[in-house]
Image: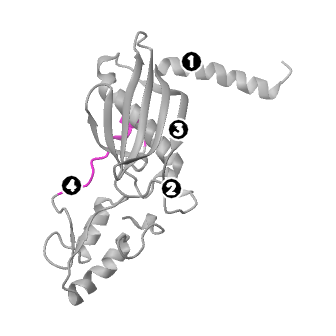
Amino acid sequence: MADRFAQFADGEQVLTVSECIALAATRAERAREEWMLHLGQGIERSDLDALLAGGVTENGSGMRLAAPDLPLSRPVRPPVVHKHRAENVLLADLRNFSKTHCAAGLRIHRDNEHLLDHHATRHVPGMLIVEAMRQICTAQFETSHRPGLPSCGYAGIWHRIDISFDNFLFPLHAEVRSEITEFDGEKKSNLRFRTTASACQNGGVVARAEIEYSMVKQERIDVLEHRKATGAARSQLDPDA
């Protein structure tokens, strides 16, 4: 896994990229047993190239990739989850099973905004899980519902999130799922959703949420925000007005 998650690595079963590179050559020389390397969170193409250059092999003895033909995850494009920066996208390999049910792999970039200023722990921050759930709801809208709507921008308005955390999520393979349980599409300018979202790891649910949100035309949001922002500023400047 990426060096960012060094606190989770134990130096035996779980290694960072730097630890793998340091051990690869020495194990190939002095040990006959074979180490199978499974990629964890935060691994980018540059990390994989560094591992291969440092002595990890795609086949052969020593330390090698467990699945050499398995490509790195295919991150969702930033606009699909309403983000600007690729490192802040938390979803990869999105699958739409129907218009109401989808799933994606959790993809945590080493420079994700929720990691850069967070106290180092072995588990993934809870707010990152909340953001992953927001992103899968947004991606579900953009890929399953957006194609049949007017050609204008939409913004997400989040009304309620009722979330429970049942376990820690660690920087290993995980999945995020969303199932739409209620949908009101009568107004094309304001579509309302109720969704059950979950984050799963090793066959168990680590967090689940009931979410209510709307996808609203951007031009409508702009007018509403401008009016409310003006009112908020006036209230700060003149509370008695």
| Residue position for label 1 | 223
Viewer can see residue 206: yes
| Secondary structure category for the residue under label 2 | helix
Which is nearer the eye, 9 or 71?
Answer: 9
Label 3 vs 2, first from the N-terminus: 2
Provide the residue span drawn in magenta.
70-84
Q: Is residue 83 visible?
A: no
Callouts 3 and 2 close, C-beta under 8 Å:
no
* 81 inside magenta stretch: yes
Badge number at residue 163: 3
Task: State which mark lies toward you, 1 or 4.
Answer: 4
Residue 71: image tag: 4
Name the element at disc 4.
Answer: loop
Which residue is painted at 27% across and 86% down in the image? Answer: 26
Q: How far, Cα to Cα, is label 2 from label 4?
A: 25 Å
Mark 2, residue position = 115
